[in-house]
Amino acid sequence: MSPEELAEQIAAGNVRAVARACRLVDDHAPEARELLRLLHPHSQAAWTIGVTGSPGAGKSTLVDRLIERFRAEKKRVGVVAVDPTSPFSGGAILGDRVRMQRHFEDAEVFIRSLATRGALGGLSRSAADVVGVLAAWGADVVLLETVGVGQDELEVTEVCDTTLVVVSPGLGDDVQALKAGILEVADVFAVNKADHAGADATVRDLEAMQALGDATLSAHDGHVRFRPAIVRTVATTNQGIEDLVRALEAHRDAALQHGEAKRQQRAATTLRRLITQALTERAFSELGTAVEEAERRIVEGTSDPYSECDALVRRLSIPRS
Amino acid sequence: MSPEELAEQIAAGNVRAVARACRLVDDHAPEARELLRLLHPHSQAAWTIGVTGSPGAGKSTLVDRLIERFRAEKKRVGVVAVDPTSPFSGGAILGDRVRMQRHFEDAEVFIRSLATRGALGGLSRSAADVVGVLAAWGADVVLLETVGVGQDELEVTEVCDTTLVVVSPGLGDDVQALKAGILEVADVFAVNKADHAGADATVRDLEAMQALGDATLSAHDGHVRFRPAIVRTVATTNQGIEDLVRALEAHRDAALQHGEAKRQQRAATTLRRLITQALTERAFSELGTAVEEAERRIVEGTSDPYSECDALVRRLSIPRS
């Protein structure tokens, strides 16, 4: 099937075409780029929500509840779930997602798992592209659930309209970890497992950090930032989900008014990512075994990485398409 | 001062030259690459130890104890401490490192802080190069302390001979987080704050994961892997530090026998990193404002990132040095 035919079928809502496109994109098949180019105009309407936070905070259960809630409104829902690929976990973490599988028989829900690119998490290189495929399929909402370890929090904000950070009491969401950046990426906080001891303390910590952040930010750039809502949830018993959805929607509506800057940012990120990928793929393919020969000289001690890099880059002809 | 003169002074042990070189490297000054090339032959003898783990596990205090311990043996010690650069933290995390400052007056200890490259951590791009500078200065041991959030754990193993993972009871080091990759990168575990409740449970969790890992690994590739030691420490009261150093040294000695593969891996990583950096820097500098023009078309909806990427890469002449 040509990329044109596949793109047409996806835009027409064909689920099997979507599954096929996800595979092509994840395998970096040669026709994937053309397909993504064709799908791009169709993928601009979906609301994309990133769900991140520490492992064990209850992200999968919360995503399951959000699917349920959006389906009650007859919305079409796409889910991209990023899984760690570790020889040790061996898919065990997937167990948390068993609950989500009850949606597999719903034709208006499409769930796709992706492996992380490294043992320690980080968003799969394909994640942004698969989100685009599900959006082009006509999903009203696409949920992107991360592993929650690694830099993927930062990448999620580049891919999604709204970023939900899930924290839970006493599970490594201590003040220091929050300081280290999570506050910057959150559009909405869910304090999940809110029935556990320590939930109040977690909410208080978040509020204190926000107050500090507000002060720092106004000192920095003088404008008022969207202040993330803090919502208490108990995903296992479906508590707080309505409040959570309202907070997410409030962010979406507020963000629409400032959407230009975010779309600009996202276009820039995607374009830079594609250019870097294209350049390095072509360069290493052109250099071939010369790279391994250079490595050998470095290991032998007859050369160093800096000289070898210069020599290799000089050898490159033109990385044209 | 020319890179040649600077390299000579560093190799002669001049601390001010080291400070200057660290600045040049961190600023990506034009002469930094030449300097690093000249220092490379001098930077191969140091023992590099990466120290990673969750925020709040006590990494800085443990590093402080390790400096003290190595100094008692008259070893020259370099420390690279990676700090998160967050508008919210504003350097507050540095407070943990106040203790370490007692070593600042010791001419045989050189401590350099580096900012992370993004709000959410990850090893600074300069970290590997600064480790090289301190090694060339003649440090017997270089300790690289990470922020402990993000993918930096994985990167640390690429830069360091020995990776120490610091965990502490009940601080987010739950089984799920461990599964997600930390076990793969650890050469030695320190269960710090071992006087706290839950330390036994943490040690048991680690042992259980190791047993599982052993089974998985032998099934996978049939050879026996170095099994990380698990050492209990209380850094604040200096307990367990001797045991920890012995475990680190045992790893170093064992690794020496299998060092070829690791050095090969590291040469490959460094070379690939340098090539990718060189290519993208040159490409974006050559493309200039054309990138922003392409972004504008994408945001306006008159084009898409895939077509623009192809057009831009086609425009590139030769990314020669």
Image: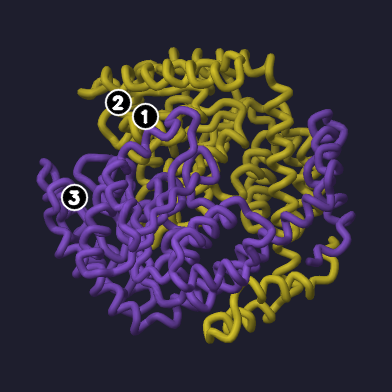
Chain colours: A purple, B yellow
Whole-angstrom CA distance, mark 2 to mark 3, is 32 Å
Q: Gap between marks 3 and 1, in whole Å?
A: 28 Å
Q: Which residue sits at x=40%, y=41%? A: B97
| For residue A38, above or below residue B272 | below
Q: Nearer the viewer, mark 3 or mark 1?
A: 3
> Which mark identifies residue A235?
3
From the top left corner, tell me how far across and down residue B167 is, in percent.
36, 29
Give the mark, 1 or 2, whose residue is nearer the N terminus: 1
Tell me where residue A127 appears, x and y as whole percent.
49, 56
Chain of the residue that carries numbered disc 2 in the rendered image: B
Q: Tell me the element at label 1.
A: strand
Which image quarter: residue A56?
A: top left
Q: Chain of mark 1?
A: B
Residue B90: tell me if it is visible: no
Image position of A268 (left or right of A232): right
The N terminus of chain A sits in image quarter: bottom right
Q: Are marks 2 and 3 in contact (CB under 8 Å)?
A: no
Element under label 3? helix
Pick the residue in front: A127 or A12. Answer: A12
Q: Is residue A198 above or below residue A48?
A: above
Q: Which mark is residue B193?
A: 2
Q: Nearer the viewer, mark 1 or mark 2?
A: 1
- For badge 2, the amino acid type reads Lys
Residue topped by disc 1: B167
Residue at 46% from the left image edge and 34% from the top image edge: B181
Is residue A54 shown left or right of residue B259? left
Residue under disc 2 on the same chain as residue under disc 3: no
